Image: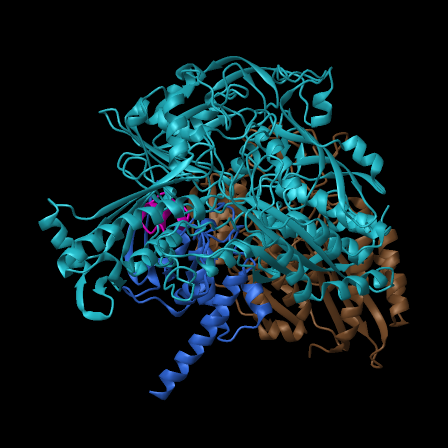
Chain colours: A cyan, B brown, C blue
Amino acid sequence: MSDLQFVGKRIQRKDGPAKVTGRAMYTGDLNLPGMLVGKILRSPYPHAQILNIDISRAAQVAGVKAIITAHDTLGIKHGFVETPRYPADQFPLAMDRVRFVGEEVAAVAATDPHTAEEALSLIQVDYAPLPAVFDPLEAMRPDAPEIHPSHPKVREPFQNIAGKTETSWGDVEKAFAESDLVIENRFESHLRTHGYLEPQVSVASFEPGGKLNVWTSSQGPFIKRAKLARTLGIPFSTVRVQKAYVGGAFGGKIDLFSHEYCAALLSMKTSRPVKICASREEIFAAYRHGQPLLVELKTGVKKDGTLLAQQFRVINNPGAYRGSGVVVIFLAWGFATLPYRLPNLKYEGYAVYTNNPVRAPQRGHGAPQMRFAVESQLDMIAEELGLDPIEIRLKNARRSGERLPNGDNVHNCGLTECISQSATHTEFLEKHKANRSAASANERYRRGIGMGVSAYFGGSLIYPNSSSVIIKMNDDGSLTMLTGAIDIGQGAETILSQIVAEELKVPVDEIQVIAADTETTPVDIGAWISGGAYVSGNATREAATQVRTKLLQIAANELEANPDDLVLEEKTVYVMGSPDRRLTYQELVSASVRKNRGDPITGEGHWRTMKDEPMHPSLATTKGRWSENYAFDAQIAEVEVDTETGVVRLIRAVTAHDCGFPINPMLVEGQVDGQVSMALGHAFMEEVLMEEGRTLNPNWLDYHMPCMHNIAQSEHIDVITESYEVGRPYRTKEVGEGLVSAILAAIANAVYNAIGVRLYSTPFTPEKILRALGKIK
Amino acid sequence: MHLPRFNLLRPRSFTEALEFLERHGADAQIVAGGTDILPRLKYGLLSPEFVISLKRLHADSPVLTSEGNLRLGSLMTLADVGSSQIIRQNAPLLAEAAEAVGSKQVRHMGTLGGNICLENRCLYYNQGHEFQFIEPCFKRKGDACYLFPKGKKCWAVFMGDTAPALISLGAELEIASHEKMTLETVEGFYTGDPVRPNALSRYEMIRDILIPMPVGLRGSAFVKLSPRGGLDFATLSIAVVLDMADDGVTCLTARITLGAVSPRPSRVPKAEEALAEQRLSSELFRSVSEIVQNEVNPVTHHGFSRAYLKKCLQSQTFDALTLAASRVEKRGT
Amino acid sequence: MKTLIELSVNGEKYELGIEPQLTLLEVLRDHLGLTGTKEGCGTGECGSCTVLADGKPILSCLALAADCEGVPITTIEGLAQGDSLTTVQQAFLDTGAVQCGFCTPGMVLSAAALLEEFPSPTDPQIKKAFEGNLCRCTGYNKIMEAIRQAACNCGQQNVQEKDK
């Protein structure tokens, strides 16, 4: 490790200078000649039949260039999941029925926003309202209004089932019978949103020759191209989705959104560029949020704290279309069972259609909700059995080389180190005990400490499955990398450059990155399945390896040396032991062009997680491999509760994580801190308030995303379980999603430690705290 | 988001501004700092034909008058109110309240007059109503209330921070129209009707704010409870003024004004009476805070329940009284 | 009806005929091409549109462009001289205070204004100055670190300048 020059170093972001000077161009910053403004007409009803749409008056407004409704579309549905079991279920524009408030009904392109809005107001839509249902348990009842037919393969007498995941191993009933303690609880999470600062925005520019250029704020251009081409009924090759800087996403900008489709179709109709930018209110009230889960959890343990069996029933409320709702109930199984050995499991998860806006992945995609349930209950079990929170976790924590029931191997697993080191670092046990005995005292401010544990996969098989990278050498010995990876703030371009720099000994700032352009860059897994550092990273390393091999070959010829005796150093190659026998990369490129029939030295590399696994695992049964790469972490929260106002502050968060090895520790810390902040928002203050499908707080005044006053001291402990060696594949793990989960559970346990009352639902608002303390009825 | 189209009038003097009001008042909207009006214009809650911007008008510096008043121009920014030495010395409560408003940027833009004239707020009202809550509520000239579906009137709460402070300070407003100048107490300025929260007519504007200076010892505190401790409007706020006897421990008179729990900032006379002529102590503060809790029936707003607000009225009153008592010193001239 | 206005932005004078309802944000972005100033909400909550008016941070989404006549405006594009970054900008890079970058222009300008007002700000002063700048990526930790570092480096610079 010690001879690494670029990997493992706190190297500044490549895009940093552009961002601190305002030069970085985001999609909304694009201004093309003749560009029109697009606006979308949305349903005011949570559930209604569309009887008629009359655009005649709107079409007469001067400055209106095009109006589209479902009748202008091909009627091709799309969905986050599009499989035979879960076919697409959403039209880009509502066809004959709307199923949530805010559903897209029509779109207008006009010369300015005032004209576009005037046109929207003149579109006459006749609706026949239908009965609506918003709560998933109510929506499951056989007499509930039908939003979509229940899934044909789910044979229970439930209405509105969008999908079901069911799995088991061992024999839970037998294990419960053999348990010394069986405990059963119900945990509820609430509706939160991503809170990306940059609004959802797209620019589409259709060229008369038939080329559709699209810039859109996204988490990867390839899935956008696929879904746009398919829903618009045009060939892949005519759609080009290109990079612009992305101002945050957190899971909220993955699959196709109506505004992207509408911008494209409006541009095709008008042959002019069209920009559609969602207002913050639209994003809050009509776009996709995270997914609240209802978790019923029954656990059986032995006296010594050994987990024997767990039974889960998870109900998800994904809104009016499937979105990623059926993915969450699949992932939830994994997030529930990854960190601890569990010999017997029964799991069932339901996604239930309701007349709410559609839901999407949100950082952690079910993990925070599941860890909150499991870790809260684990602390309850420990207390019941007279164990401490650390020993019960250590007793059950997975260890290196363990096999998961689906066949995955956790490989090098640093979980026990994470638990022990974070506990020691915070003097956890001493504080935990002291707080508990003080919890009933009459002091206004009470402290609490709690631990949570989590694990997360790094890359799985969902389209696009793989990453590929091309590296070109330039005449001056610098490099250009072409990658489909997109930097959404996590630093993808920086870490990929660090890998190239390390493999080829070229300074990071001499590596040009051309990224995230479906036309010029190879495909990439996308910034949404926690596979960036591993999948895109190994593809990059492979490409760099090819370049290095070529460099060494040509250098060996030129220097009349054995390639094994050559050393790369600062854009030169020299013969080991004879540093004077040295050629610069510039000279080597020139030699290659001269002697290798014009080869300017390029390399390509590709990577796919689980190379022997043909398919992604079954969303219905969980059968099949999931990932070959698991990150583990333990997090500790220290909170202070004001028992007079019910306000809880996260004072300190300590994160011990096994992310394999950090390619850029500064970026890793940034990921950790951001997740701690998001989790404290989740825990204490953020909630999308809804009433019958309508959003009460569609703005940042009333949706309380943490501001700088709410900052928590965030400390990091790296548990390094992997290494990086030049020329070798590596197994680094994810760091962008798992750490939003354990800390939420840790906060929940810390609140209990402080006040002595267990809270079973998020968020832990001041009001709930005061009720728990018996200070309000 | 963009603003609707309007004609912009930019007077260069108060006189000219009042002339514009005289001419266009019925169809005009004054904008000073813009931090309350512009979002409402963008949401379509206002659609005036004319916008009268007061940005070209000079904000007078605060002065102590010979009558023993602190005189402030309504166009002072909240940041200037918060940092002004003369205000911090003579009416620290107001500076404290001004500093509690919104964010740094909002305080640099927003004016004291604008904060006094803040519109009442409600989750259902402060929205665009393009596809949500389309049917107008009472405040949007309709005949329904979303917050209380069986309600017969609007219950939007007044959430300004400086008004409770000004009321506790006994401040008055100089209200100017083209014809005349009238004096109105800040307390009397608010109507309690959320549809038209204050007494300002469409042809008037606030010129100056007058704060009477205390003759003896005084302690004051402004306490604001909010979800994030910054950026937010108040969940509830309390402005306390304790005028003290020369012994420094006996309260002569007290003024307690609450914000964000009703359609107007309101005093709590019973609590004030309980403090008058009393020696200050924690026990007294405890009983006074319970009086506030019992006397006041807060309006549920922004997702905060009545029970929660009631409990916080008690704890925040106690905090505010304790803080005010710890700050007793000679103020004014 | 268009209004003729004269704006002073980053030391340059611009004469513009604009519709009177345009905000400073719209004019900066759409008329002057200064797209470094961002719109995150348009209603004054997120601080992404922060610019300096006469050195003070304001929300350009809530300022009428016409009202900014005669007030020197500084946007993010007006800070760095060529390739040389300001101390604040450099500190944001050194500490890793930038992730997606959307809040960064507003953050950097708020920081510049803060250090002008308080060269060695306390943590409460920093929090008070930044309560109107939302960031979702960083949790604010490294932004706070950047401001502390910039304060330290600005201080050193001042000392050096005095020594000269």
Q: Is B126 a magenta residue?
A: no
Q: Quadrant of residue A132?
A: top right
**The furthest residue to the top:** A51
Q: Quadrant of residue C99?
A: bottom left
In the image, B52 versus A10, the foreground residue is A10
In the image, B83 versus A400, the foreground residue is A400
The residue stretch that appears in magenta:
C18-36
Whole-percent x and y of residue C136?
Answer: 53, 51
Whole-percent x and y of residue A498?
Answer: 36, 56
* Residue C51 in the figure: left or right of residue B148: left
* Residue C151 in the figure: left or right of residue B165: left
Instruction: Determine the residue positioned at 49% across, 54% down.
Output: C47
Whole-percent x and y of residue A425?
Answer: 65, 66
* Residue A398 in the figure: left or right of residue C70: right
* Residue C8 in the figure: left or right of residue B136: left
Q: Is residue A61 visible?
A: no
Indicate whether A203 appears above or below A491. Answer: above
Indicate whether B221 appears above or below A72. Answer: below
Indicate whether B89 appears above or below A290. Answer: below
Q: Quadrant of residue A648?
A: bottom right
**The furthest residue to the left:** A594
Whole-percent x and y of residue B309?
Answer: 78, 50
Q: Is residue B277 visible?
A: yes
Q: Quadrant of the N terminus of chain A?
A: bottom left
Q: Quadrant of the C terminus of chain A?
A: top right
Q: Is C34 a magenta residue?
A: yes
Indicate whether A106 appears above or below B91. Answer: above
**The furthest residue to the bottom:** C163
